[in-house]
Image: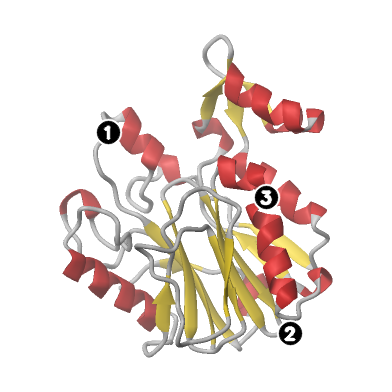
């Protein structure tokens, strides 16, 4: 059975389906076990397609189209206005999607980065964003909210939920990484604390993303407090894979659909 997490802020609205999916409940095997939804991985494409169809079934939207992008840690958000002109995940690069079209499931792929799902129940606009540290620093969240505004949303009507990502105790970075944030804004120092090694720090990615969302004056914001790096049974993790020696890894998906 496909395993996914939901949040009450979004579950309260029956016009949408949403899920922060884990790695459980799919057909992939080996290092991709089991719900790998990453089209760009070296997994069997047929198994990835079957996993992505399972996601649509879990969202009670089996006939919807699941749209994802070639993610590049940017601040670029695609607006889906026409069902006849949809992004191509192999060609269209960006890190967020918004639409007011029913039957379009917007998805973002993660393996430590933060997935964020958005919904405006007044204008009936949905969004999904992928926020690693670089995309978050460069403004992907503000870009997503602006794009929703192009479809009629007002920030105060938008709900946003951050899904599972790497947590601060698992995210040690060097001094240059920290300095980049503080140079941008000295107040960002609050998102770092001393690491286990000299001149290394623990970065609070979900806290940083949450603060950015709050600064956008949205109607409601929250997060799901799971650490993708420390739970190998439930989540894929780039950092955990890297610490173990590297290699390819699966991607979990977070998705939202307007019914």
Q: Earlier in the sequence, mark 2 or mark 1?
A: 2
Q: Is residue 68 above or below residue 186?
A: below
* Separation of marks 2 and 1 at Cα, in angstroms: 44 Å
Q: Residues within 10 Å of mark 3 (few under 14, many from 20)?
A: some
Residue furthest out toward the top: 198
Residue named by callout 2:
123
> Judging from the image, what secondary structure is the residue with disc 1 in?
loop
Q: Earlier in the sequence, mark 3 or mark 1?
A: 3
Residue named by callout 1:
246
* Separation of marks 3 and 2 at Cα, in angstroms: 23 Å
Residue named by callout 3:
139
Q: Is residue 116 above or below residue 152?
A: above
Task: Pinpoint residue 94: horizontal percent, then vertical percent.
Answer: 51, 58
The disc placed on residue 147 is none
Q: For residue 194, which quarter of the picture? A: top right
Task: Pinpoint residue 103: horizontal percent, then vertical percent.
Answer: 48, 88
Residue at 76% in and 81% down? 152
């Amino acid at each position: 059975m496909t395993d996914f997490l939901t949040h009450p802020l979004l579950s309260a609205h029956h016009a949408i389906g949403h899920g922060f999916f884990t790695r459980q409940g799919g057909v992939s095997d080996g290092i991709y076990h089991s719900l790998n939804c990453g089209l760009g991985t070296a997994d069997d494409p047929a198994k990835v397609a079957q996993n992505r169809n399972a996601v649509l079934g879990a969202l009670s939207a089996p006939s919807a189209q699941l749209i994802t992008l070639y993610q590049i840690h940017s601040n670029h958000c695609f607006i889906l206005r026409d069902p006849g002109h949809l992004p191509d995940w192999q060609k269209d690069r960006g890190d967020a999607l918004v639409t007011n079209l029913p039957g379009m499931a917007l998805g973002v792929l993660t393996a430590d980065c933060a997935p964020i799902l958005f919904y405006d129940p007044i204008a009936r606009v949905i969004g999904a964003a992928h926020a690693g540290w670089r995309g978050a620093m460069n403004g992907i969240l503000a870009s997503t909210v602006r794009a929703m505004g192009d479809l009629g949303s007002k920030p105060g009507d938008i709900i946003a939920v951050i899904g599972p990502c790497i947590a601060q105790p698992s995210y040690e970075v060097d001094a240059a990484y920290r300095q980049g944030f503080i140079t941008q804004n000295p107040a960002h120092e609050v998102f770092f604390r001393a690491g286990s090694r000299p001149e290394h720090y623990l970065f609070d990615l979900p806290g940083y993303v949450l603060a950015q969302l709050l600064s956008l004056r949205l109607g409601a914001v929250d997060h799901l407090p799971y650490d993708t790096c420390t739970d190998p049974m439930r989540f894929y993790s780039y950092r955990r894979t890297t610490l173990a020696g590297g290699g390819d890894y699966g991607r979990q998906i977070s998705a939202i659909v307007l019914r």
